[in-house]
Image (tube, helix red, strand yellow):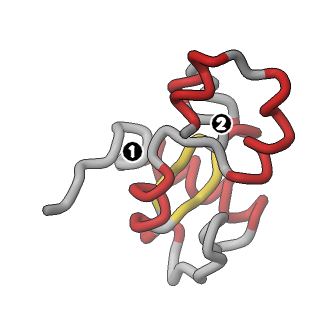
Amino acid sequence: MKRSLSRPARLRGSRGRRIRATLGARDGLRCFYCRAPFQSSDDATIDHYLPCALGPIHRQWNLVLACEPCNVRKQHTLPLGLFLALRPLLDRTRLEVAA
């Protein structure tokens, strides 16, 4: 069963193309997590590096390109390296989101 992605990941149209093109120029046309190359930025989804569950930060520095499997797998969790760095600062309720 395929899970539906959040609205920003599925952002289409001229605004979505512009955001994906900007992120592709900044980071290269590769998945941020598995480094798989994209044929074009239209093949990528937009992911929030810091998940929206911790506070919706819709800024360009918090957006990365991800392939659909990686974006679905990550969901609302923190990437491991960031989780380990922030762990002393997170309270118990926020740790449940990251687990």
Which x, y percent locates residue 55?
A: 59, 19
Q: Is residue 24 above or below residue 76?
A: below
Residue drawn at x 67%, y 50% is 79
- SS at mark 1 in the image: loop
How many marks are shown on the rendered structure? 2
Amino acid type of disc 1?
Leu
Quarter of image, res 1: bottom left
> Which of these two is toward me, 33 or 41?
33
Mark drawn on residue 81: none
Category of crowding for the residue at label 1, using alpha-carbon neighbours closer than 10 angstroms: few (below 14), some (14–19), many (at least 20) = some
Residue drawn at x 45%, y 46% is 75
Pointers 1 and 2 in contact (C-beta within 8 Å): no
- SS at mark 2 in the image: loop
Which x, y percent locates residue 10?
A: 35, 48
Which x, y percent locates residue 2?
A: 19, 61
**Mark 1 / mark 2, whichever is N-terminal:** 1
**Residue at the spot of label 2:** 50
**Residue at the spot of label 1:** 11
Q: Is residue 95 above or below residue 77?
A: above
Instruction: Name the front one of labels 1 and 2.
Output: 2
The quarter in which the C terminus is drawn is top right
Category of crowding for the residue at label 2, using alpha-carbon neighbours closer than 10 angstroms: few (below 14), some (14–19), many (at least 20) = many
Residue drawn at x 66%, y 77% is 35
Amino acid type of disc 2?
Leu
> Which of these two is toward me, 25 or 73?
73
> Which of these two is toward me, 15 or 70?
70
Is residue 24 left or right of 89 when viewed as pictured? left
